[in-house]
Amino acid sequence: MTFQDCSFDIIDGSAKVLGTQDPGTHAFDDPPVPFIKGEEVTFTGKWPLESFLDNAKEEFTFLRADGSTVKGTLIGFTVGCTSPYRHTLGIPRLRIRIAPLAKVDG
């Protein structure tokens, strides 16, 4: 069984689908089905995150505009994205591992 990863930018409490990140180029390829690159979804799960110990333990559910839901497990995140000098470096991001043929409700 091959799992797929999907990254999301967290903007104002919503998640924007980025897709699956290529480890060599760091570019975002198409996300796992049923997500569409660039779509905005809402989510439930522990937020904000503060400890790397949450990886592989926290479950997230994403609600799409059509009413369907997709579940996955947290495998990485950034929060605040600040340097030691407190300059903002980016948008908070989640990376979620989704099982193939993930259960889609709705």
Image (tube, rainbow, N blue to C red):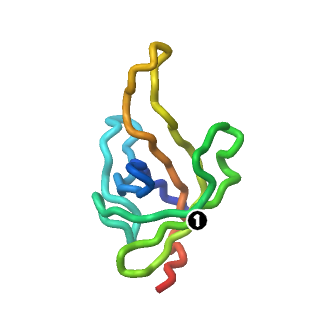
Quadrant position of residue 49? top right
Number of labels in the image equals 1
Query: 18 or 32, which is in the foreground?
Result: 18
Q: Name the residue under label 1.
A: 1
Between 72 and 24, the one nearer to me in the picture: 72
Residue 61, above or below 26: below
- Which residue does the image show at 36% across and 75% down from the upper left? 65
Vertical arrangement, residue 54 with respect to residue 98, above or below: above
* 48 in relation to 61, above or below: above
Q: Which residue lies furthest to the bottom in this view?
A: 106
Residue appearing at x 46%, y 71% in the figure? 63
Query: Residue 28 placed where, x, y %?
Result: 32, 47
Query: Furthest residue to the front?
Result: 12
- Quadrant of image for the N terminus: bottom right
Query: What's under tag 1, amino acid-wise?
Result: Met
Residue 100 or 45: which is nearer the viewer?
A: 45
What is the crowding at mark 1: few (fewer than 14 residues within 10 Å), some, or many (at least 20)? Answer: few
Where is residue 21 drawn, in percent x and y?
Answer: 38, 46
Residue 13 placement (x, y as % from top left): 45, 54
The secondary element bearing badge 1 is classed as loop
